[in-house]
Amino acid sequence: MNMKLIRHSKWTQLFVTSYILVVIILWIKQIQLPDEEKRLFLQTGVVASVALCVLNDSGVVAAAISMFAVVSTHYYWLSQNQDLERKKTKPYACSGFVFPCQS
Protein backbone atom coordinates (compact mmCIF):
# COMPACT_ATOMS: atom_id res chain seq x y z
CA MET A 1 0.00 0.00 0.00
CA ASN A 2 2.86 2.40 0.79
CA MET A 3 4.36 1.99 -2.67
CA LYS A 4 1.03 2.78 -4.32
CA LEU A 5 0.66 5.89 -2.14
CA ILE A 6 4.22 6.98 -2.82
CA ARG A 7 3.61 6.84 -6.57
CA HIS A 8 0.16 8.43 -6.69
CA SER A 9 -0.29 10.63 -3.63
CA LYS A 10 0.38 14.32 -3.10
CA TRP A 11 1.51 13.45 0.43
CA THR A 12 4.72 12.12 -1.05
CA GLN A 13 5.84 15.67 -1.86
CA LEU A 14 5.37 16.73 1.75
CA PHE A 15 7.05 13.53 2.93
CA VAL A 16 10.14 14.01 0.76
CA THR A 17 10.35 17.76 1.43
CA SER A 18 10.15 17.24 5.18
CA TYR A 19 12.94 14.69 5.16
CA ILE A 20 15.11 16.90 2.96
CA LEU A 21 14.60 19.79 5.39
CA VAL A 22 15.50 17.56 8.33
CA VAL A 23 18.70 16.50 6.58
CA ILE A 24 19.59 20.12 5.88
CA ILE A 25 18.71 21.34 9.37
CA LEU A 26 20.18 18.58 11.48
CA TRP A 27 23.15 17.27 9.53
CA ILE A 28 24.36 19.82 6.98
CA LYS A 29 23.83 23.06 8.93
CA GLN A 30 24.07 21.31 12.30
CA ILE A 31 21.72 23.80 13.93
CA GLN A 32 21.53 22.80 17.54
CA LEU A 33 18.97 23.76 20.12
CA PRO A 34 20.35 24.53 23.56
CA ASP A 35 17.55 22.74 25.41
CA GLU A 36 17.92 18.97 25.86
CA GLU A 37 14.14 18.42 25.96
CA LYS A 38 13.69 20.08 22.56
CA ARG A 39 16.46 17.97 21.02
CA LEU A 40 14.85 14.84 22.45
CA PHE A 41 11.49 15.90 20.96
CA LEU A 42 13.05 16.31 17.52
CA GLN A 43 14.89 13.00 17.65
CA THR A 44 11.78 11.20 18.85
CA GLY A 45 9.72 12.83 16.10
CA VAL A 46 12.10 11.69 13.38
CA VAL A 47 12.21 8.13 14.73
CA ALA A 48 8.42 8.03 15.10
CA SER A 49 7.99 9.27 11.54
CA VAL A 50 10.25 6.54 10.18
CA ALA A 51 8.36 3.96 12.26
CA LEU A 52 5.03 5.23 10.93
CA CYS A 53 6.28 4.93 7.38
CA VAL A 54 7.56 1.40 7.86
CA LEU A 55 4.89 -0.10 10.12
CA ASN A 56 1.66 1.53 8.92
CA ASP A 57 -0.14 0.49 5.74
CA SER A 58 -0.68 4.13 4.75
CA GLY A 59 2.50 5.25 6.48
CA VAL A 60 3.48 7.87 3.91
CA VAL A 61 0.57 10.06 4.93
CA ALA A 62 1.18 9.62 8.64
CA ALA A 63 4.93 10.11 8.28
CA ALA A 64 4.47 13.24 6.18
CA ILE A 65 2.12 14.80 8.71
CA SER A 66 4.33 13.94 11.68
CA MET A 67 7.49 15.22 9.97
CA PHE A 68 5.71 18.44 9.01
CA ALA A 69 4.86 18.97 12.68
CA VAL A 70 8.47 18.26 13.72
CA VAL A 71 9.98 20.61 11.12
CA SER A 72 7.47 23.38 11.88
CA THR A 73 8.12 23.14 15.60
CA HIS A 74 11.88 23.20 15.05
CA TYR A 75 11.68 26.35 12.92
CA TYR A 76 9.44 27.99 15.54
CA TRP A 77 12.01 27.26 18.27
CA LEU A 78 14.81 28.58 16.07
CA SER A 79 12.93 31.82 15.46
CA GLN A 80 12.34 32.20 19.21
CA ASN A 81 16.06 31.72 19.89
CA GLN A 82 16.97 34.30 17.24
CA ASP A 83 14.53 36.80 18.75
CA LEU A 84 16.03 36.29 22.20
CA GLU A 85 19.55 36.79 20.83
CA ARG A 86 18.48 40.00 19.07
CA LYS A 87 16.95 41.35 22.28
CA LYS A 88 20.16 40.60 24.17
CA THR A 89 22.33 42.48 21.66
CA LYS A 90 19.93 45.41 21.09
CA PRO A 91 17.57 45.65 24.08
CA TYR A 92 16.22 49.08 23.08
CA ALA A 93 16.20 48.79 19.30
CA CYS A 94 13.70 51.02 17.53
CA SER A 95 10.87 49.37 15.70
CA GLY A 96 10.70 51.90 12.85
CA PHE A 97 8.71 54.63 14.59
CA VAL A 98 9.55 58.31 14.20
CA PHE A 99 10.05 58.69 17.96
CA PRO A 100 13.60 58.27 19.31
CA CYS A 101 14.57 55.10 21.12
CA GLN A 102 14.83 54.95 24.86
CA SER A 103 18.31 54.46 26.20
Image (cartoon, rainbow, N blue to C red):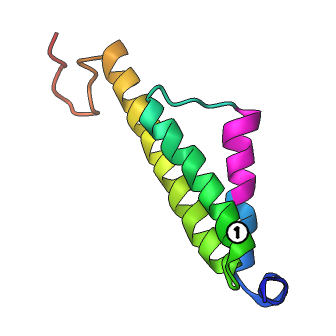
Q: Is residue 32 left or right of residue 18?
A: left
Point 52% across, 37% down: residue? 39
Point 26% across, 25% down: residue? 94
Position in image of residue 80 (x %, y %): 38, 37
Q: Quadrant of residue 30?
A: top right
Q: Is residue 18 left or right of residue 6?
A: left
Q: Quadrant of residue 31?
A: top right
Position in image of residue 32 (x %, y %): 57, 29
Q: Quadrant of residue 92?
A: top left
Tell me if mark 1 has few (under 14), some (14-19) or many (20+) residues whose alpha carbon lies within 10 angstroms of its own: many
**Would you place residue 95 above or below residue 50 in this image?**
above
Quarter of the image with the N terminus is bottom right
Q: How many marks?
A: 1
Q: Which residue is mark 1?
A: 15
Q: Is residue 67 covered in magenta?
A: no
Position in image of residue 75 (x %, y %): 51, 46
Position in image of residue 33 (x %, y %): 51, 31
Quarter of the image with the C terminus is top left
**Would you place residue 55 above or below residue 98 in this image?**
below
Q: Secondary structure at mark 1?
A: helix
What kind of residue is marked 1? Phe
Residue numbers of the magenta segment: 19-29
Q: Is residue 27 covered in magenta?
A: yes
Asked whether residue 23 is in view, the answer is yes
Magenta stretch, overall SS:
helix
**Would you place residue 12 above or below residue 66 in this image?**
below
**Would you place residue 54 above or below residue 9 in this image?**
above
Camera-side residue of 19 and 101 = 19
